[in-house]
Amino acid sequence: MPVARINGLQTYYEDLGTGEPLVLLHNDALSVDVWRRLMPFLAADRRLIAYDRRGHGGSEIPAAEAPYTVEVLADDLRELLDRLSLGAVDLFGCSGGAITALAFALACPDRVRRILLAEPPMLGLQQEHSIDTAGLSGETIARLMRERDVAAGLDYWFRCVLPPTRAKALLRSRYRSLLLSRPPWIIEGIVRSAEAFNPTARLATVRQPVLLIVGQETHRHFSSVVDVLAAHLPDARRLVLPGAEHSTLLDPSDVLLSAVRVFLKSGDPPKECGAS
């Protein structure tokens, strides 16, 4: 199992394929396993770097008193790229991984070529924009875990942003043991870090091409965040995945694979891809 000590924590990562490097940043509370179905397609002509972010999957869980912020997560990515002697890379982040990708691009713009952001739950945008927050709050998730347990907090979180049947299925899926093994301070930290991150004033400085991916059937929270990003990022395009919602974004559909290939090769896909 390849691991590297990143900012004091043992970090699990995978490095496969050859070609220009593409870093994969997984969803909150999950692991690199969410990329398994896409990896064979992406690795056909790319070098893939996928890693479990701190407190996730096979990576070490930080102490409860350690800061858990978007900036810390972005610095972990910088340290990993340094350890692998990688310069500029492309980034593909899904959900919370997309927040880390954008934070890294803001902190280290010379290390990023292109950015794919799939439905970042950027709650901090509510500080300046009328996004739909889906009723999700760090205070509520902390209270539920304090009064009950991690399962109660996760159930509340997933029901806020996923269709009821999908939310219920996720806690019964193969990810159940991984999800329930996360300590409450990691679950709370994920949501509170998203609430604190409001990059509105800096979005105009992102000069890289950005592909914003959103499911046609997704919760309004994610589409409202994508609307803000599309309006403020200078070189953003939107990819709408027909029939998809937040939990099915990484299904390897023809629409997704075609758009990703075009974007990564040219950085200049059509301004609008897929269904509108």
Image (cartoon, helix red, strand yellow):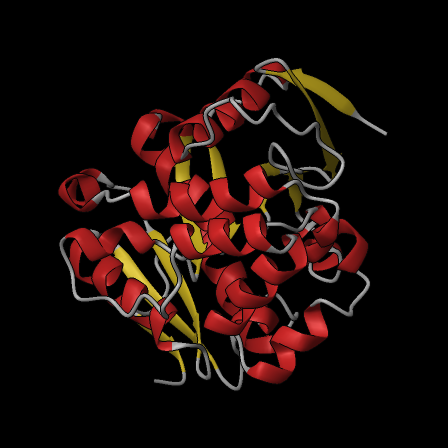
- Residue 1 position by quadrant: top right
The residue at 66%/51% (across/down) is: 30
Locate residue 256, reporting x and y percent.
Answer: 54, 70
Residue 23 visible? The answer is: no
- Residue 164 left/right relative to 228: right
Q: Nearer the viewer, residue 48 or 173?
A: 173
- Residue 72 position by quadrant: top left
Locate residue 33, reporting x and y percent.
Answer: 74, 52
The residue at 53%/73% (across/down) is: 159
Residue 191 visible? The answer is: yes
Q: Nearer the viewer, residue 158 or 263?
A: 158
| Vertical comparison of 58 with 209: above or below | above
Locate residue 110, reporting x and y percent.
Answer: 34, 26
The residue at 24%/53% (across/down) is: 125
Q: What count of labels does the image hold?
A: 0
The residue at 40%/35% (across/down) is: 70
| Vertical comparison of 61 with 16: above or below | above
